[in-house]
Amino acid sequence: MRIFMLLFLLASALVQSQEQLPQNYFQNPLDIPLILSGSFGELRSNHFHSGLDIKTQQRRGLPVYAAADGFVKRIKVAHYGYGKALYIQHPNGYNTVYAHLQRYAGPIQEYVKEQQYAKESFEIELFPDSEVLAVKKGDIIAYSGNSGSSGGPHLHFEIRDAASRPMNPMLFGIQVPDSKPPIINSVYVYPQQGAHVNGSANPTRLRLMLQQDGSYKTEAIEASGTLGFGVSTNDQLDGASNKNGAYTLQTTFNGVPTFGVQFDRFSFAETRYLNRYIDYGHYRTDRERVQKLFRESNNPLSIITQELNSGYIDVAETYNGMYTIEITDFANNKTTITVPITGKKEFNVPPADRDETNDYVYADQSTAITTGKFSVFIPSNALYEDTFLNINSKGDTLFLHEDVVPIHKNISISIDASNYASQDLDKMYIGRLNYRGQPYYTTTYRNGSKLTAKTRTFGNYALATDTSPPTVEAANFKDGQWISKHTTLQLKIEDDLSGIASYRATLNGAYILTEYDYKTDLLTYYFSDNVVSDSENNLKLIVLDNVGNSTTFEATFFRK
């Protein structure tokens, strides 16, 4: 077995060496010291982080530079996600991505504005021909911002390969100071079927003891059967207190490598399998992401670079062993954990805790469940494993298990609302209830008296009604005011129930481009667009929510 593992490691190294990644080809996209708020592969909600989040000193508007020669191949402007994003194709086959931008620069900004006005839409996706927007290394292509789902000003920067798979930018020579070893938060052991640890068949948290050399040792455990381990860890780079992700995780059992994870590259098609890789239920209840150091069924993640027996270890009675976890950041700072194990067979161990219900779903089969007015359809492979689910309803509320089981692809929720009048149904939707019992809009489709929504989250859902139109108010001007010195026109638009769906603004009957920031509820028009030429200007704004309620706001202002 040792010879097999040595051959496996040698083959892996040869494959890695065949891809010679260009060094010093890509320059830093900002001209300030690189301090990260997010690292490549970091564990996020439902996905691995696909780039570097570079701090911008709490500022917006810093110049963003093309990392290398190339041409703009894609531009996307969205309210959510990456916000304003730019994609550059480089001659060597790689792509770079720049996201959460405040605005684009020069010809790129002019091109985007022209297309937005032509389509009369702020949200837009463009694929310019290669000769339209060529860039040189070091050109200013945009300015940093906080657009989209960004939680604060920063630049999200990616390098993708020819297959559009994100890669760790540090592999290309992008250097970020890091002198601190990874931090260990907790270690868990997961007994598999028929196994036990310290007389329990349930997952067990092990007590950590810091050693003088900076390593950790857990309490000694007595166990029997097949075991898997998990670890909660993060890395802290120099100059920031953010909890970033580690680079590699490697385990051994009595010196033999058993499992390895390395965050070099992954595909977007596999990124949601993060929910299979972590202990999802533990995360939902304790807000701690434990990385499972073993591969379960329906886990195709390519970040797993090495495994023996899928990462599990087998402990026999009277057998003594040492399990080791080594965690490394990209700067090769290491933290090691050792787990002493003694094989001891216990009898009459209670089975692992499991809530058994009437609804048992086989992961590889489609399942339809009806309760009261509701129907739930779970397609095959929507769940990672066979699972007991607790599904019931009361009136217009569906209790769809707890959000402790991950859903990989959409399941459908339908309700028969034939007891409501047709005109009432037009304003109804299915909403997921938050902890206060308030419905959060879920995209809902209506077919007659049947309403259907799709979701990838368990929890409570209810039929909700929204008859209130959005609210609109001027934010930086008043009706009838002279605003010659203003650079922007701002309005605040809100809808507390189903949410904002669309908006359209005109000045003197001509369309104007307004940018919506859902985080601040602000709608902004820039006078630099030069749509305004008259002294007296009549503004008209129509805002719709997600069930079709609308508000029309009108005002007059003056400029010279």
Image: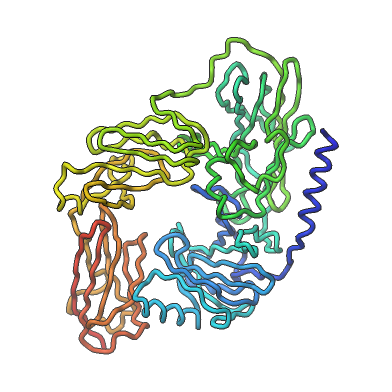
In the rendered view, tell whether residue 148 sits above or below residue 128. above
The residue at 71%/22% (across/down) is 315
What scheme was used to colour the molecule? rainbow
Q: Is residue 176 above or below residue 304?
A: below
Report the residue that reaches farthest toward the right: 3
Q: Residue at x 58, y 79 (%)?
A: 130
Q: Choose between 380 and 399: the one closer to the eye.
A: 380
Q: Position of residue 134 (x, y in %)?
A: 58, 81
Residue 145 is situated, as x and y percent measured from the top left of the image, at 47, 67
Residue 468 occupies quadrant: bottom left
The residue at 62%/46% (across/down) is 301
Q: Looking at the figure, which quarter contains the N terminus? A: top right
Up-down relation of residue 238 to residue 2 (above or below): below
Residue 141 horizontal side relative to residue 450, left or right: right
Could you say which quadrant of the image residue 205 lies in? top right
Q: Is residue 452 above or below residue 310?
A: below
Using the rendered image of the protein, determine whether residue 326 is visible from the camera's viewpoint.
Answer: no
Q: The C terminus lies in which quarter of the figure?
A: bottom left
The percent position of residue 282, horizontal first and vertical second, equals: 50, 34
Q: Quadrant of residue 490?
A: bottom left
User: Which residue is painted at 77% across and 53% down in the image?
Assistant: 15
- Number of numbered discs visible in the structure rendering: 0
Counting from the top left corner in percent of width and height, residue 10 is at 82, 47
Q: Is residue 407 visible?
A: yes
Which sits in the foreground, 328 or 46?
46
As drawn, is 59 to the left or to the right of 538? Answer: right
